[in-house]
Image: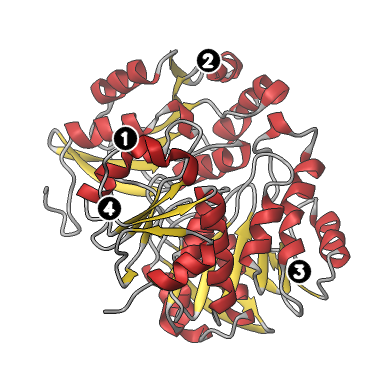
Amino acid sequence: MSFLWTSEDMTAVIGGRPIGTLPEGITGISIDSRSIGEGEAFFAIKGDRVDGHDFASMAVANGASLIVVSEAKLPALGRLIAPMIVVDDVLAALGRLAVASRERSNARIVAVTGSVGKTTTKEMLRHVLAPSGKVHAAVASFNNHWGVPLTLARMPADAEFGVFEIGMNHPDEIRPLVKMVRPHVAMITTIAAAHLGHFKDLEEIAAAKAEIFEGVEPGGAAILNRDIGQFGFLEQKAQEAGIARIYTFGQHAKADFRLADFEGNAESSTVWAVLSGETSEIHIGAPGRHIAENAMAALGACLLVGADMARAMEALAALKPVKGRGERHLLGIGEGHLTLIDESYNANPASMRAAIALLASATPELTGRRIAVLGDMLEMGEFSARVHEELAGPLLAAGIEHVWLAGPEMAALRDALPDSVQVEYREKTSELADFVVRSVMPGDVVMVKSSLGLGFGKIVAALLDNYPAFSDTGRQS
């Protein structure tokens, strides 16, 4: 059997004390007792809301072959009989394992941050690098103080490429994480008004994102968005961090990985990309100009880590939107169908505008409507009312005449929209979900987007529960 880690190596690396007869090795690592796999190690991390030690027995019952626990919590585990490694602090031990994983790896590593597009670009990189070798990347948006070390500790020793997403909502969060990851290529997708409540302005956000440069390996590279106002600032920060190889992407004439032209439709897009001075026509299986722009960054990263570029470009044709980030569903309703665009995972002003543009590019059938179902953008602080009001402009420019809203902050957008727009407002997500399910009609295109805390996934789930989905063949399933 092939092990992710032998128990002997893992115990030594994390500085633990073994209790009981440890298995020869483990096949994986989990911090979730519900989804742990047979033969995996359970790290009982204490989080903000729950303590993994409270679920240690469940992890063992679900197949964990050993558990990693804190010395201080050992008495509370009572009579639990299971192989254990006892450590001073479980999260710190996971961090030590992450560092050891990086040290043993020969993979070419790409790290991605940015206000918008991190997860989509990470998944795109996983997809386009796969034809060139074994790729390791996080299974979800594991981009914080536990997600990054967990993803790194899970990296197989024989991985040829590693892709890591690193997020933040305060300064000094990226710095320690990128020093674990030590990427060969660091990418910033864009700077936008995300988490604005924790920062004074966009330059402060850019400075926090620029922490990613501090962990880049000697001789490594940075990839920056040439189209944004903070480009010069980020370029300077990269240079100050000692990065000599700085590349750019975007539509700018001087971009190294340039989006020369774009043709999009509701399901996909065709782009003309200029890479290393050569123009290529590329089909992308997901819609949206913002997806095409991030594809330039992803292809640039492929080039820098030595991937097969022809196969990477071909792979983009099979790219599909990530769940909650533009995923589309065709749902049966009456004698026809409606299109659901699921953008429910998260939202900030930049991603809201991108989603509105995506809705504008969709074509309703017969008498169908384009409907924007929008919820609050969180962490906007004192800027909240203004950034919600300012969504009126993109909605009007896109010709969206039906806007259904929920959340206290969205009251500002409700009041900013003219009478020409048919606005429905509910304070609670559950109330809006009931309205949406009752009010959609055949031919409609419905786009659902909000910050994760609003729970707009419930609206998506309600639509999926009430209207049957069509399969790829057009039949209801």
Q: Secondary structure at mark 1?
A: helix
Quadrant assignment, res 433: top left
Q: Where in the figure is residue 257, as x and y percent of width and height?
A: 67, 73
Is tag 1's residue or tag 4's residue first in the polypeptide sequence? 4
For marks 3 and 1, give the CA distance.
Answer: 40 Å
Q: Where in the figure is residue 369, as x and y percent of width and height?
A: 36, 32
Q: Quadrant of the N terminus?
A: bottom left
Is tag 2's residue or tag 3's residue first in the polypeptide sequence? 3
Q: Is residue 20 left or right of residue 475?
A: right
Q: Is residue 248 visible?
A: no
* Residue at screen point 34% across, 39% down: 77
* Residue at screen point 47% across, 29% down: 453
For marks 1 and 2, give the CA distance.
Answer: 20 Å
Q: For mark 3, what is the residue?
A: 253
Which is closer to the viewer, label 2 or label 3?
Answer: 2
- Asked if disc 4 and disc 3 are in contact, CB closer than 8 Å, the reply is no
Which is closer to the viewer, label 3 or label 1?
Answer: 1
Which is closer to the viewer, label 4 or label 3?
Answer: 4
Is tag 4's residue or tag 2's residue first in the polypeptide sequence? 4
Q: For mark 2, what is the residue?
A: 408
Q: Is residue 189 above or below residue 207?
A: below
- Asked if disc 4 and disc 2 are in contact, CB closer than 8 Å, the reply is no
Q: For mark 1, what is the residue?
A: 460
Q: Is residue 18 visible?
A: yes
Q: Secondary structure at mark 2?
A: helix
Which is closer to the viewer, label 4 or label 2?
Answer: 4
The amino acid at mark 2 is: Pro
